[in-house]
Image (cartoon, helix red, strand yellow):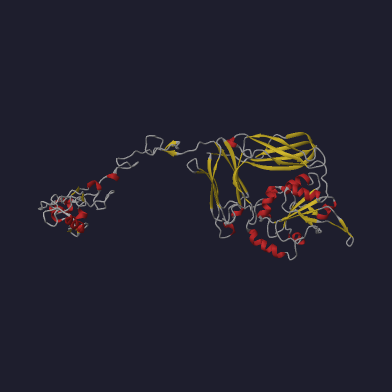
Amino acid sequence: MRYLLTSLLCVFTLGLTAQLPNGSVAPDFTATDITGVEYNLYDLLDEGNTVILNFGATWTGPVWNYAQIGVLQDLYSVFGPEGTGDLYVFFLESDDTTTDADLNGNGPATTGDWVSIINYPIIDNASNVFDSYSNSYYPTIYTVCPDGVLNENTNEMEYTLVESGQASFDGHVTAAFMDCENSITGAAPLMSYNGETSSCGGGQWMASTSVNNLGSDDVTAMIFTAELNGVAQDDITWGGVLSNGDNTTIDLGAYNETGTFDYSLVSVNGADWNAEEAVNIIGSTDATSYIQVRITTDNWPEETGWTIESASGMYIDGVATGELAGQANTEFTWDVALNLDECYVFTMTDTYGDGLYASQWGDFADGSAQIIDLGNVDSVIWFVEGDMEFAEIIFGMNVNLEIIIDGCMDITSCNYSPEATIDDDSCLEFDDCGICGGDGSSCIQTCLDDDDAVSAVGGCINAVDLLGCAFYWDDVLISELCPESCNNCPCDNDFNDNGVCDDVEVFSCTYPDAINYNALATADNGSCVFETTNACPADLDGNGVVATQDLLSFLSLFGESCL
């Protein structure tokens, strides 16, 4: 949680000396865990145990996320006092201001229930140990080797440490045994769940675990117990030979109910063993094959990531954490095509562990996440509100629905949709104006004479004849009162831009001096005929002969207007 932003400032300023470098002598300490058991570091090292010290605080997201992965829990189960007996792990809660409630996940400064997910000893109020190691940040994880060297001045053994950090299981095994030269005695089976994690469509799912022997002795017999939602299932027994470095997969049974599946390895080679793992088995929501992942980032987008995998674990699509860095408070959408009749698992992660709940840290906007089924009328099939904290959240999808597309399925309709799968009664026809679904009004003449306005002179036709279109009648032009009679209606086509629509254009002679002048003509068509009294109109000089001088006179007048 973002409590880290303020509280870590105090942690950094507390340490005036540098963090202990690798190879330093580990300070000895004695402490009592939350169950009342007292431990002394050097006593455990004297007995030949490697000791891992995990310093943290209940409110630190990175420490919580690492705890959820379960690396240190696995180490303790396999190599701890109830495993091979070669290693101890301690969680040292080093912020003394936190409470028991915070450790149990219901206090104000916590990321979750630490007591329920940690199977190794928890030491509370360990700030004094934190300070003795000159620590300056959370998380700090040391591996202390049982490589005691006698200090001749104090006559006491001293043991060295290395900062192993949030390493992988193999990394911690290397640091705890190979680097420390501490051997793994006996059989050391490590189990890891590799079965199905979702029930597709409420159907049967298969549970199984992978077991790898890290010990020096062969594993020849194992007994597992299992519970589903707290109800005990049949024990699972295995027999064979699993030598050092070998691996095998063990069938843990078939189940139908979803929920929490707990299984434990309780016996190895006839001896008691204590290793357990819990797996959340999710159900599935029916969906079509076309979905959209929609995420609005919060103030820390670099922490957000997601994947979609098939039920068999095949990667389909996703965004790795860190890819959205620098894009706070931004909505992203990803369209994903899935195969019909298959199941998929959507996993969303937040590396800090607080989900998209940014407002808890100050004046920041929360993010949100949704999965939209685009093939089912854009229905929301999964969502996360901003005020929900999580490090990982999982959602199952069973792609068994046909894509739903509403539309007109009548092929004779003007709005026929060939993609439609459901007829939604939206089919339409062309109206008289050729408009799909129109009411026929778009081609009705709306430019009409207002005969009532000029009824005193008998209507528009008389008004135009008597007064003309440019006359003002009660301060309104006759052309506006009688647009039809005045050819003042707006038109779509007017080829000569003379204000007269082509469909009512009158082509004739428009020259008043012509014998055939037409007063109703709106466009001249070159048909005008003019009266002449000269029997020889080409004899321009009047000498009775059409000669060269007449041609020269004509050319001198060529181009002049006759009007």
Position in image of residue 499 (x %, y %): 24, 53
From the viewer's perspective, is 491 left or right of 23? left
- Above-or-below relation of 278 to 92: above
- Where on the picture, by quarter, is residue 151? bottom right
Position in image of residue 295 (x %, y %): 55, 50
Which quarter of the image is occupied by the C terminus? bottom left
Residue 103 or 533: which is nearer the viewer? 533
Total labels drawn: 0
Position in image of residue 5 (x %, y %): 64, 60
Residue at x 89%, y 62% (from the top left corner): 153
- Asked if one can make out residue 553 in the rendered structure from this viewpoint, the answer is yes
From the viewer's perspective, is 229 left or right of 434? right
Position in image of residue 6 (x %, y %): 64, 62
- Asked if one can make out residue 560 in the rendered structure from this viewpoint, the answer is no
- Where on the picture, by quarter, is residue 271? top right
Which quarter of the image is occupied by the N terminus? bottom right
Residue 293 or 553: which is nearer the viewer? 553
From the viewer's perspective, is 114 left or right of 289? right
- Where on the picture, by quarter, is residue 438? top left
- Above-or-below relation of 562 to 73: below
Residue at x 69%, y 37% (from the top left corner): 208
